[in-house]
Image (cartoon, grey):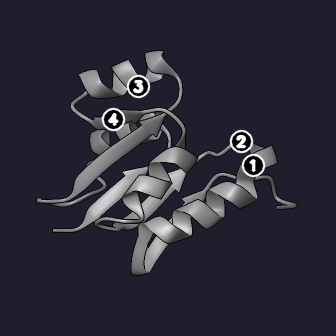
């Protein structure tokens, strides 16, 4: 089983809707906005409501993910990137929406 994590709850819903994962794959949304988290959960997504940086500390100690996808706050992008790298398996992927000058 591969695991995939999405930083943003709405990204998780898009991944699920477009079937961009395979059987047995797990999508986890991490969303700080309670409304977006509820929307993702209603769509059948496993959601952690809170800050990705807090979530990453917990996850990096357990089963790492195959892929982390997100849209981090630009001012904290470097912190999010470091945290995401701790959450992925060796050979995994980190995909973020960032400013071109990051």
In space, the residues marked 4 and 2 are separated at their CA atoms by 19 Å
First in residue order: circle 1 vs circle 4: 4
Name of the residue lying farthest toward the right: 101
Instruction: Report x, y in % for residue 51.
Output: 54, 38
Which residue is painted at 41% across and 25% down in the image? Answer: 37
In space, the residues marked 1 and 2 are separated at their CA atoms by 5 Å
On the image, numbered disc 2 is attached to which residue? Answer: 73
Residue 89: quadrant of the picture? bottom left
Secondary structure state at the residue bearing disc 3: helix
Q: For mark 2, does the 10 Å Cα neighbourhood hold few (<14), some (14 to 19), or many (20 or more) residues?
A: few
Name of the residue lying farthest toward the top: 35
In space, the residues marked 2 and 3 are separated at their CA atoms by 17 Å
**Left or right: where 65 falls relative to 43:** right
First in residue order: circle 2 vs circle 3: 3
Which residue is painted at 36% across and 20% down in the image? Answer: 39
First in residue order: circle 3 vs circle 1: 3
On the image, numbered disc 3 is attached to which residue? Answer: 37
**Left or right: where 18 falls relative to 85:** left
- Above or below, 12 relative to 39: below
Q: For mark 1, does the 10 Å Cα neighbourhood hold few (<14), some (14 to 19), or many (20 or more) residues?
A: few
Residue 26: quadrant of the picture? bottom left
Disc marking residue 100: none
From the viewer's side, name the closer residue of 18 and 98: 98
On the image, numbered disc 4 is attached to which residue? Answer: 47
Secondary structure state at the residue bearing disc 1: helix
Q: For mark 3, does the 10 Å Cα neighbourhood hold few (<14), some (14 to 19), or many (20 or more) residues?
A: many
Q: Are marks 1 and 2 in contact (CB under 8 Å)?
A: yes
Q: Which quarter of the figure is the N terminus placed in? A: bottom left
Q: Which quarter of the figure is the C terminus placed in? A: bottom right
Name of the residue lying farthest toward the left: 23
On the image, numbered disc 1 is attached to which residue? Answer: 76
Q: Are marks 1 and 4 in contact (CB under 8 Å)?
A: no
């Amino acid at each position: 089983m591969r695991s995939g994590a999405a930083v943003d709850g709405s990204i998780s819903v898009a991944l699920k809707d477009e079937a961009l994962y395979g059987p047995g794959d797990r999508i986890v949304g991490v969303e700080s906005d309670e409304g977006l988290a509820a929307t993702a959960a209603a769509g059948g997504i496993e959601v952690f409501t809170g800050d990705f940086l807090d979530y990453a500390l917990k996850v990096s100690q357990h089963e790492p993910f195959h892929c982390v996808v997100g849209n981090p706050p630009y001012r904290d992008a470097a912190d999010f990137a470091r945290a995401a790298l701790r959450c992925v398996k060796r050979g995994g992927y980190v995909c973020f929406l960032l400013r071109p000058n990051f």
